[in-house]
Amino acid sequence: MSFYNYLIDFTLTNVGTPTEPVTLAEAKNYCRVTTSADDALITDLITEAREAIEKATGLCIVQKTVKIWFNNPASNFSIPYGPIDPTTFKLYDNVNNTEILAINYRLVGGQYPSLNFPIWNQLRAEYTSGFITLPKELKIAILDQIDFDYENRGADIERYDQSGVCQKAWRTCQRYTRTSPIL
């Protein structure tokens, strides 16, 4: 029996077709591209950069449906992949596959809550996550990543970290991650 909280598994599913937070025109302007020859490439880089920033921060930049399976024996399990919409949060006893009513659990916090109780193992939660308005710093981090990937396409670049993002974007990601980037 474990006495530590931990995430067992998760799924992230886009809600509909995601609208990227950076437009093609913004990306081309940031990368100082004036022709339309690389429009398809830059469009792909926009999605790849957003996904890399999401992975590095543990946040959902576009709206997603999140399902997590976890244990909460020590209480205060940090709900991952924020910012969450607390009105969509549903908690289940995964053993009996029954919903736990809101009066029987407590979320502490706003967009990045912790589950205070129940203190149980084998729980499942489902909720919607994602930014309504993306913070400007994260948008710039996406643009920095697009620019880095565009300028270094085809090159075998050794990145300073193994997170999949360039160093400039990584500095922004560190401010938004909820886990220590050192660990």
Image: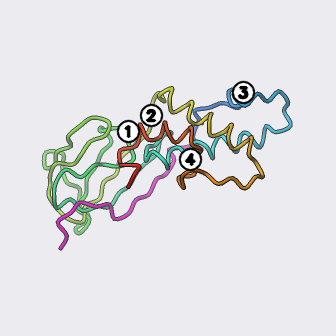
Magenta segment range?
1-16
Single out the mark in the foreground, 4 or 2: 4
Q: How far separated are the C-alphas under marks 1 and 4?
A: 16 Å
Secondary structure beneath label 4: helix
Q: How far separated are the C-alphas under marks 3 and 4?
A: 19 Å
Residue ID at (49%, 38%): 171
Secondary structure beneath label 1: loop
Residue 161 vs 171, above or below: the answer is below
Image spot of residue 123 (x, y percent): 25, 61
Is tag 2's residue or tag 1's residue first in the polypeptide sequence? 1
User: Could you tell whether 132 is left or right of 143 in the image?
Assistant: left
Residue underneath mark 1: 83
Image mark for residue 51: 4
Residue underneath mark 3: 25
Residue 11 within the segment the image draws in magenta:
yes
Residue 5 within the segment the image draws in magenta:
yes
Q: How far separated are the C-alphas under marks 2 and 1?
A: 6 Å
> Could you tell me the amino acid type at mark 4?
Glu
Counting other residues with Cα less than 10 Å from the Cα at mark 4, is it few (<14), some (14-19), or many (20 or more)? some
Residue underneath mark 2: 131
Counting other residues with Cα less than 10 Å from the Cα at mark 1, is it few (<14), some (14-19), or many (20 or more)? many
Is tag 1's residue or tag 4's residue first in the polypeptide sequence? 4
**Cβ–Cβ under 8 Å for marks 2 and 1:** yes
Q: How far separated are the C-alphas under marks 2 and 3?
A: 21 Å
